[in-house]
Amino acid sequence: MTAIDSLVKKAPSGNLVSQRERPAAPPDPYAAGCPTRLLLDRIGDKWMVLTLGLIRDRPRRFNALRRDIQGVTQKMLSQTLKQMEPDTLITRTVLPTTPVSVEYAVTPLGRTLATVLDGVQLWARDHIADVLGAWRLYDRRRLR
Amino acid sequence: MTAIDSLVKKAPSGNLVSQRERPAAPPDPYAAGCPTRLLLDRIGDKWMVLTLGLIRDRPRRFNALRRDIQGVTQKMLSQTLKQMEPDTLITRTVLPTTPVSVEYAVTPLGRTLATVLDGVQLWARDHIADVLGAWRLYDRRRLR
DNA sequence: CAGCATCCAGAGCGATACTG
DNA sequence: CAGTATCGCTCTGGATGCTG
């Protein structure tokens, strides 16, 4: 399976080519295979968001990321980074040290996405208490 | 299991109470159980994002949503809506028609989140072509 | 240090059938 | 119309051990 196949495999009826051929057509976010859904599939991988956030500040090495992202396993971090590089959200540089060290840095494209995701993080910081409070009320009402 | 349990179950070491007790401490988005992660778990459910986007425009009924969100199953939509209501992102109103009809509407809180998610959608619209192009190059290089 | 390979338990989700 | 209930499969993701 090619990389592009894996990108669109969840949208069997979508047709990316037609989107590129008719750029004037407004993309429908509720259609399968649309840009929004492709991105949501990426964001759905929460490690990607956290990883991008860290790398954005400054380039990082593999184990540094592993340490700083609480709870991520080696497998998931590896998988996430491997996807983000072909996405051109980050770059991967092997440094000729012994033993080898690998540095991950953000690309300009990745930086623009990170900026957008800042908004999400700010919302979380400012409003999550409301959600948690609502859940408490909900639980109390359920138990009564 | 209570609703709050389900919210935090993926962050066994996180402690929401301590976060509320020490609001001065800057929340670490890379710690388990932090607001950002809680929100990411919700956004990870892509149907939630799409559903919120639709309801935000105007209140909708169940089957209307089912029709308009391409590819969603009844089960997933039902599950998504059932979660969003205790989150207080949407309201659920049963109308006394026959047969019964149920209308879902956005709350003020839900509207603020939808606004943030607009940014995500705009990024997707403006930059997904870059990502797809990068994948094409990557595939070609791999096959050569 | 920076990964890859393997195994496998459990969550997620679709499909299907049924209900008030 | 607006769901609930159940089955069964897939696929994610954690744990573990190994490599250049």
Image: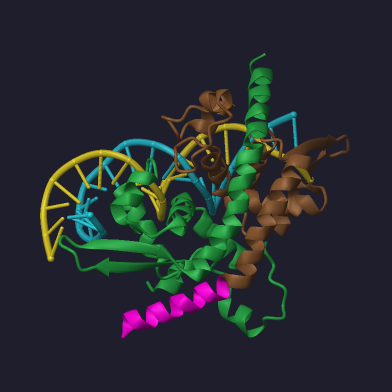
Chain colours: A green, B brown, C cyan, D yellow
Image location (x, y in percent) of residue B23: 58, 29
Which range of residues does the magenta coloring cover?
Answer: B128-144
At 54% from the left and 49% from the top, the residue drawn is B44
Q: Position of residue D19 (x, y in %)?
A: 11, 60
Q: Is residue B143 magenta?
A: yes
Location of residue B97 by image quarter: top right
Residue C12 vertical position relative to residue A6 in the rendered view, above or below: above
- Residue B144 x/y as whole percent: 31, 86
Q: Nearer the viewer, residue D18 or B28?
A: B28
Count of marks placed on residues? 0
Residue depicted at x 77% and y 37%? B92
Q: Is residue A136 left or right of residue B16?
A: right
Between residue B72 and residue A18, name the one nearer to us. Answer: A18
* Residue B15 part of the magenta segment: no
- Where is A95 relative to B86, above or below? below
Relative to A135, B65 lies left or right: right
In the displayed structure, does residue B76 sit left or right of residue A98?
Answer: right
Residue at the far right in the pictured view: B97
**Residue B94, quarter of picture:** top right
The single residue placed furthest to the top in the displayed view is: A144
Of residues C3 and A108, the one drawn nearer to the viewer in this rendering = A108
Q: Is residue B44 visible?
A: yes
Residue B70 appears anywhere in the view:
no
Secondary structure mostly seen in magenta is helix
Rendering coords of residue B78 (x, y %): 65, 42
C17 or B25, which lies in front? B25
